[in-house]
Image (tube, rainbow, N blue to C red):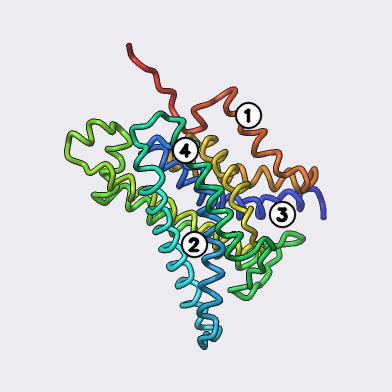
Amino acid sequence: MSALDIFFQQIINGLTLGIIYAMIALGYTMVYGIAQLINFAHGEIFMVGAYLGLTIYLAIQGFAFGPAGLVILVPLIFIFTMLGCSALGALVEQTAYRPLHNAPRLAPLITAIGVSFLLQNAVMLLYGPQDKYFPNLIPIHRFSFGAVTFTNLQMIIAAAALILMGLLNLVIMHTRTGKAMRALAEDRQAAYLMGIPVNRVITQTFVIGSAMAGAGGLMFGMYYNTINFHDGYLAGLKAFTAAVLGGIGNIPGALIGGILIGVLEGLGAGYLSSEWKNVFAFFILILILLFRPQGLLGTRVVKKL
C-alpha cells in the first residue's frame, strides 16, 4: 500500500473507532453539563453494554433467525442492551450519586471510582477474567476502492450511531424532558425555583447517557469480536478525553472530539506503531488542558464579582 492508501485506510478505521468513543463521550458530557459531575463509572457501563449484548444474543440465538431475520435480531439486541444499561445508569445515579448532590466535589468523584471498580469486578465474577468471543451478528462483506477497504459492519455502525445521535438531538431540542435538561444546564437553582424536578431530570440524563454507552459497547463487541471486563477503563478514559477535547458539557463537541480522537489514534497506529496508539489520547488531553482547557467548542466562563 502507498502512503496515501495507508492514510485513507487509517482514516476509515479511525472514524469507526471515533464514533464508538463519541457514543461514550455523550454520556460524560451530558452528565457533567446537567449535574456538574464527572461519572468515571461511565466507561464500565459501556463495558456492561458489550457483555449484555453478548448475553442477549446467546439467550435468543436458538430461535430460527434466517438471513432476513437479522433485520429483526440486531435491532432487538440493540434495544434490550440500551434498556438494560439505562436501568443500570438509573440505579447507579440513585444509589451512589443522589445522596451526594450537596456533598463536596471530591466525594462524588471518589464514589465514581468505587462504582467503576465494583462494576468491573462484578462482571469478572459473572463472566470470568478471560476474553469473551463476540460472534459476528452480521455477515461481513468487504468493499474495496483500490487498496483501501471497508466493511458493511463499519457502515452499519456509522448509520446506527447517526440515527441514535439524531434521536438524542430530537429529545434534547424538541421534548419537555430536553427543555428541562437545557434549563438545568443553564442554571440549576433557577430551574429548581421554576418547578423543574431536578432529581428526576438528572436521573433521566443518566438513563439517556447510559443507553448511548450501552449501544457503544455493543458496537465495540461487534467490531472487535472480543470483549474483556477491563475494556471500559481505557475506552472510558479516551471518551472522557474526547469530551474534554470537544468541550465538556457540549454535545456536538463530544461527537467531534470522539471522531478526532479515533482518527488521530488510527493515524498514529498506521504511521508509527499500534503499541503507541493509546498514548495519543492522553497526549492530546495534556495539550488541551494546557492551551485550551474549555475545549474546541467550549466557551470560557468569566465569573463576575
Q: According to the image, label 4 marks what residue?
A: 38
Among numbered discs 3 and 2, the one appearing first in the sequence? 3
| Above or below, 64 relative to 142 | below
State the separation of the CA atoms marked 3 and 2. 21 Å
Instruction: Specify the label residue 160 is tagged with.
Output: 2
Task: Identify the amino acid type marked 3.
Answer: Gln
Q: Nearer the viewer, residue 205 or 267?
A: 205
What is the three-letter code of the residue carrying label 4? Ile
CB atoms at circles 1 and 2 under 8 Å apart? no
Residue tagged by mark 1? 286
Residue sitting farthest toward the right: 1
Residue displayed at 69% across by 38% down = 280
Q: Does any portion of residue 256 appear in the rendered image?
A: no
> Mark 4 or 1 closer to N-term?
4
Callout 1: SS: helix
Asked if labels 1 and 4 touch by Cβ distance under 8 angstroms, the answer is no
The x, y position of residue 37, in whole percent, is 42, 37
